[in-house]
Amino acid sequence: MTSQVPSAAELAELKAGLHRLARNLWWTWNQDAQDLFQELSPRSWQNLYHNAVAVLREVSDYELRVHLMEPEFRQRVREVLACFDGYLKEPNTWAREGAPALSGRPVAYFSAEFGFHETLPIAAGGLGVLAGDHAKAASDLGIGFVGISLFYREGYFQQAIDQHNWQTEYYSNLDPKNLPIEQVLDAKGEPVRSSVRMGFTTVHFQAWRVNVGRVPVYLLDPYVEENEEHYKKLAARVYGGDSTTRIMQEILLGVGGVRLLRALGIEPSVYHMNEGHAAFLILELARERMAEGLPFEQALASVRSECVFTTHTPVEAGHDRFSNELMGFMGQKFVQQLGLTQEQLMALGRVHPSDSHEPFCMTVLALKGSRAANGVSELHGQVSREMWQGLFPGKAVKDVPIGHVTNGVHLPGWMKGTVRRFWYNKYCDWERANGSAQPSAPHIRTADSWERLVNSPEFWSRITDPSVTSDEELWSLRYKLRRQLVEFARRRLLIQGQRISQRDFIEFDQLLSTDALTIGFARRFATYKRAPLIFDQFENVLKLVRDPLRPVQFVFAGKAHPRDDAGKSYIQKVIHLSKHSDLKGHLVFVENYDIHVARQMTSGCDVWLNNPRRPLEASGTSGMKTSTHGCLNLSILDGWWREGWDGVNGFAIGEDSHPTDVAEQDRRDSENLYKVLTEQVIPCFYNRDADGIPRQWIKRMRAAIGKLAPEYTTWRMVQEYVAKYYLTHS
Ligand SMILES: *Cc1c(COP(=O)(O)O)cnc(C)c1O
C-alpha cells in the first residue's frame, strides 16, 4: 500500500472505474465491491435502496476524489477493480471447455421479466428472479448468452396496505439515469432503433443494456417520440393492462427482440423462451426464413430446430390465451407475412387445431415451435407431460417430449453479506489448516475463483465439517441473522404503522423476539400457495406462540396480483390476525415483498414454510435461497423439495402423494403441517444441551448447507441446460 499522493490520471481512472462498476450488476454479488458503495454514504445507501448508480450521483465528483486520496480506500478500489476486470477478461471459464460452440453464437434467452436486484424492479416474482439468476450464472460460467426483455418504466407495482388491511398498488417512475442500465447505441453513437407492427400501427422502440457480469441483457423500450402516447406506454408495467396490452407487449418482446438481435448483428445458435410470453419470436424467425425462400412448413421446421422452451407452471392463469378477434386484429401482419389464413394462424396456438372456439395459447405456440421443452422440477415435468399430452396425439404420457431441469438460485448473489464474510473466513481457516501457502488476500479473490468455490460441493463439505466450523459458531451465526431480520421487520413495521397513523401500534421491542423459533413465509399470494393455511389451526397455533419455553413466531410477506381479490383476501386475513388477534407481536406482515425483503427473510428465518396445493408449485425456488444461511425448509413434497429433502436436511409435510379432492387435501395438509411442527420442528429446535446448543438442529443445518447449497444453484442448472438443451439438436 502506498501513501503517495495519486496522480490526477490515476484518480480519473479510479473514478471512471467506480462508475463502470456501478453499471455492472457484478457488484451485487461481490461483497467487497458492495462495501465500497455502501461506505461512500451509508445513509444514502439505505435511503436510495442500495442503488450504486444513485449513490454515485449523490456523491459529488470532488467528494469522490477526496475519498480516493485516502490510501486504504484507494487500495481497496484498486483491488476490487482488478478483481472485476479479471472476472470480465478471464479466459479459463467453465464454458471454454463446456460450451465453446456458444461463444460466437450465443443463447438468446427471452423472458418477459428479469429479477436482478431491488433497484431494477422489473420482475413480478419467481419467474423473473429465476431469469435474473440464470443470466448471472451464464456470466459466471462464461457462456455466450444474451437476454431479451422489456423496459417497464413503472416496473412492477409497489404494495401498500390500507386501513382495511386491503392491498393497494402504486407505481413509481423509473429513471434510466438512476438505474444500472445503458442506452444501446450504434457505431455512430446514435440510439439503436427498430420497429414492429401491431394491428395497423408501426410501433418503434429503442433499447437499454443491463450489464450482468460478462453478459448483456437488452430491454426493449417503446417510449420513443415517434410513437403515439398509447404505444409509448404499452410497456409501462410488468404484466400491466388487459389482454390487448398483453398481446402488444408480447409482440414487442418476441418479434421486437429478434429484430433487435439483428440490428446488433447477433446470430444466436439457440433461442430459449422462458415461459410462453415470448413465443411470437417463432413467427418472426419463420418470416425471416420465408424471406430467404422457404415455404412456411419448412420455415417453421427450420425455426423449430433452433428453439427451446421452458414452461413454469401448471396453473391455468400462467398460460396466456388470446381470442380469435384479438389475434385477428393484432396479428394481421403474421397472417400476411406468413401467407396463412387466420384459421391457420390460430391453429398454431391450439391444442385442437380445427376447434374454432379454442383461443390462441402462447404455450401451445411455444411447444409447437420448439425442438425441446422442459418443466422446472421432476414432478413438474411429469405434470406438464400430462397437461400437454393432447398436443402429441398417439403418444403415451411418458413419451410426451417435455423433460425437466430443476431450478436453482445464483448462490453468490443470494448469500447475505454477513454470510458471505462468514463462509469466506471459514474457507480461509480451512486453507490455513490444510497448509495451503498463503490464503488469498483478505476478502479478495481473483477472477471467478469465488464463484467456482461457492458452487462446488467440496467447498461446502469442507467448511461444514465440525473441525472447521463448530456448532457454537453456527449457532451464533443463526443468532446474528435472526436478529438482523427481527430488526429489519421492526423498522419496516414502524414505517408501515406511521403511514396509516395506526392507533393500535405495537411497541417496537414487543414486536417479535430475537430468541424465538422464527418461521418465514414469503412468496406471491397466489391462492394455490395457501398462505394462511397454518392459521386453519388457529387455537393450536396460539398455544405454540404463547408457550413461554418454546415460543414460535411468524414473518409473512408477499404480493397478490392486482386483479386477484382472493389473493388479497389472504393478505387481509394474515394482517388482520397480526393486528387484532392474540398473535399480535408474534406474527408480522412485511409490506412490499421484493428481492431485498426476500434476502432478509430467507437469511433470517429459522424455518422456511412452503405449503402449496401439490402439484401446483412447479418449483418453489425461494426455499433454495435459505440453505447457505442455515435456515431449514418445512415444505409439502412439491416442486424442488420433493427432490431436495433427504429426511435430515429439513422437514416434509405429508407424503409424496396427494388426494384428488381439494378440500380433503387442504384439511390433511393443514393437519400434517401442525403435526410436523409440534412433533419434529419445535422439539428439535428447543432441545438444547448443557451448553444451550441445539445439537440435533445444527446437525440438520449442516446437512442442509452441505447438500442443498451446491446442488440447487443456477451454476448447476445452466450447465444442465447447456448439455440437455442448448448443445443438442433433435
Ligand atoms: C425467490 C423469489 C420468488 C420465488 O419464490 P417461490 O418460492 O417460487 O414462491 C418470488 N419473488 C421474489 C422477490 C423472490 O426473491
Image: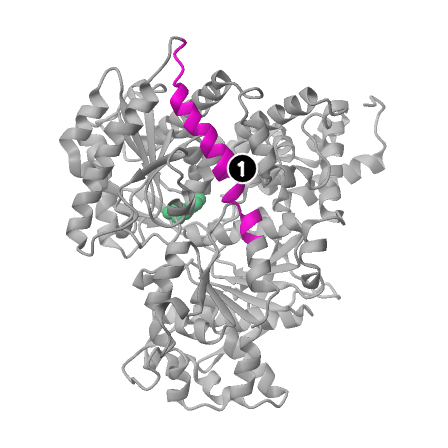
Q: Residue at x 29, y 25 (%)?
A: 682
Where residue 101 appears, as percent x and y from the top left, is 69, 63
User: In the figure, 273 relative to 305: above or below?
Assistant: above
Where residue 172 appears, as percent x and y from the top left, is 43, 49
Range shown magenta: 691-718
Q: Which residue is tagged 1?
A: 50
Image quarter hosting the N terminus? top right
Indicate the amino acid at tag 1: His
Crowding near the residue tagged with mark 1, few <14, some 14–19, many ≥20 C-alpha atoms within 10 Å: many
Q: Residue at x 26, y 15 (%)?
A: 549
Where residue 28 appears, as percent x and y from the top left, is 58, 40
Q: Residue at x 49, y 48 (%)?
A: 408
Tell me how the rendering is colored: one colour
Where residue 717 appears, as percent x and y from the top left, is 53, 51
Query: Is residue 261 among the parts visible in the rendering?
Result: yes
Q: Is residue 302 left or right of residue 322?
A: right
The question of residue 661 being in magenta is answered with: no
Quarter holding residue 571: top left
